[in-house]
Every structure is written in structure tokens, then in C-alpha cells.
Amino acid sequence: IIEAYTYLKNTLGNGFLRHAHLHNLKLGQHFANKAPWVFQWCIWLSNAIKIVHVAGYGDYILNKLKSKKSYHEGIVFLELCYFFNGVGFKFSFEPEVVVNNKIKHPDIKVTNPDSKEDIYFEVSELNPTNEHLIGNRSFDIISNRLPIGLVYCGKVLNFDKNKSEKIIAVFDEAINKVRNTNSFVELNEFPFHLGISTVESRDDLVRWAEKNQYQINSLMGEPILFDGEIKRIKDKIRVKSDQLSSVNNNLVIIHVNPLFLMGVDIANLIIEIDMELAKYPKLIGVLIYGNFSTSENEGHVFFENHLLSTRIFEKVDTRTIMLIRNNHHKTSLSQRSLNKIYDAFKFGTEKIIIQENSQDGI
């Protein structure tokens, strides 16, 4: 961790953290957070920046990380290039392509050095609605304080942000009690219904989780409605497709609220997006992903040529990814390159899903 902090200090520049705090930059907020997961995140961040530096794009990413407006985009780009680098792809940013006799600049180009094939990516995010922002706030405040080394599960309801300090104090007191007594503790007062234990007292937590139908190391928030979210995804595909050339292999990546992926009917999502992708034969497919607090369910499953994958990312939090292939894709792409795309996002061991209704075409 000392090596990571030293590298980040030297890379970001002296005085950057003070500047980040003064201007409320998100990167500064991460460093100010004392939660244990931040240390793991800093190690990953330093390694990811090194990868981009070696590729010659260090300044490009650093400028995004230092900007309040483009910080999140910079983190997303870092994560994607981290995955691409892991399977041997070479990457570059904002390549020049011609679309309808106009110069366009997709976000990322990756190259398979074995086949010399290029694949172009447009990256976007579904901006949260006001309802989503309110629903996420309470969940994020607590999930960001979840400790490494303890076991937990349960639910956090929405609460008034003006009461955050008092609620955090109650949560921290419960954490300290677990550690001091090496035992299981139930926190059952508004806004909490949580069980927390040490590894040694995990059996008590497991019994409590089974009784209350919770999943170990999974934190639930208050339900959020996602009516219209699939339509918003379709609209984003249409807009981003305009940045991509019909003579190239292309893929659109969309970051969504992770609770959408946790609750959506996967079969229906695939059917809806597959019908939309028929309008865009230049697209290999669309990759939908979100991140949330740590889960134990790492692994992947195929629905024919569509991939649903979950990874515990650097022991910090989880990435859930849905890669929906375009069955109407027209441009040529070798199986080797296609396999590399799958491998970049295919995490853990494969799970087998028994499909009762094969006529659904998924």
C-alpha cells in the first residue's frame, strides 16, 4: 500500500490531494475515505495507471481523473483497459474513423496483436434519474463503510441525509462491538436490518441470514423502480452507434445502475436488446455493466452466445456484466478475437443454467 500511495503521489503531482479536497473532486473523496476497501482500491488504481502509462496514454487518463466532470469516465476507461490488457489486447483512445464522410473519434480502439484486427468501442453511462439518486444515497453511505475482514448481510433503508452522522455512528459502534467481542451482532433499528460477524462467528450469521432470507456478504437497499430503463438503453445504443463506422467491428458499452442488473428479467432483456441490435449490423453487440458492494457469487453463465458474468473486483467490489451479442452483425471478426472479448469479461467458473423453455430462443 505504501508503494501504491507513493506512486500515485508522484504520478498525480505534489499538492494534488489538497487541490482535490478543496475543489470536491471525486478522486480526493476516495482518498479521504478511511474504509479498508480504499487501500485495496488504491493498489488497483496504481497498477491500472501503470498499464496505461506503458501504453503511452498516461497523461490522457490523468487529465480525466483530475477533472470533476470526466473523473468517472476516466475510471471506467481504466477498468476497461485493465480487462483488455489482461487478455493481450493493445488499446488506444479516440482513434480517427470516417462515418458518412465525417471524421469521428470513438472512445477506445483495441487491437488483437495475433490477428491484427481492430475493434472500436463507444462507452457511455445511463445518467441516474432523481429517484435513483435518492435511492442510491443511503445505500452508498453505508456500503462504502463496509469493513474488510468481517462478514455481513442485510438491508439498509433510505434515510434523511441530515441524519447521516448519527446513523454512521450507530453503524460504527456495531462494527466495533463485533471486533471487540469476536461475535455476531444484529443491528435492527432504523434504517438497518443487518447482521455482522467475524469469520470465527460466521455460523451465527449464516443461521440469521437463512432465517431472514439474506445472502452472505450482500447488502440490499430499498427497492428502486426501473420502468423505462430498457428503453433508455435502446436510445443510448442508437446515439452511440452514430459515432461508429459501418466498415469496422464495433461494440457499445453502457454503465447502468447495478440494481437494474440485479433485478431485471435477463431473458426479456436479451430479447428486447437483440431486436434493437438488428437495426445496427455494424455492432458486435452491447455490453451492459454495473458495480456494487462485494458479493460471494463470482462466476459466469452463457445464454447461447450471450454472457452474464460477475467478478469480485480486486477484493473490493463487484462488477456484473451482461454482454449481449448481435446476431445480425455483418462485418467479419475472427473467432480468436471474439474469444478474447469474451475472456476479458468472463470471470470465475461457469455456472450451468437449466432452461425449461428452449423455444424462447435464448
Image (cartoon, rainbow, N blue to C red):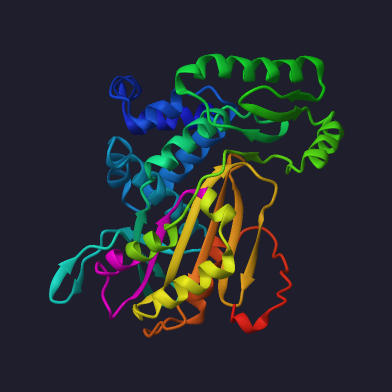
> Image point 51% across, 15% down: which residue?
165
Up the image or down, 293 lies above or below 107; here it is above
The total of numbered circles placed on residues is 0
Task: Give residue 12's quadrant in the image.
Answer: top left
- The percent position of residue 275, horizontal first and vertical second, equals 44, 77
Magenta part of the chain: 237-258
Report the residue that reaches farthest toward the left: 101
Up the image or down, 127 lies above or below 164; here it is below
Left or right placement of residue 86 versus residue 113 in this view: right
- Asked if the stretch drawn in magenta spans residue 250, the answer is yes
- The percent position of residue 36, horizontal first and vertical second, equals 59, 27
Q: Is residue 116 something that shows in the picture?
A: no
- Which quarter of the rendered picture does the C terminus lie within? bottom right
- Asked if the stretch drawn in magenta spans residue 135, the answer is no
The residue lying toward the viewer, choosing from 94 and 289, is 289
Up the image or down, 331 lies above or below 44; here it is below
- The percent position of residue 331, horizontal first and vertical second, equals 36, 84
The residue lying toward the viewer, choosing from 290 and 245, is 290
Left or right placement of residue 123 versus residue 47 in this view: left
The residue lying toward the viewer, choosing from 179 and 129, is 129
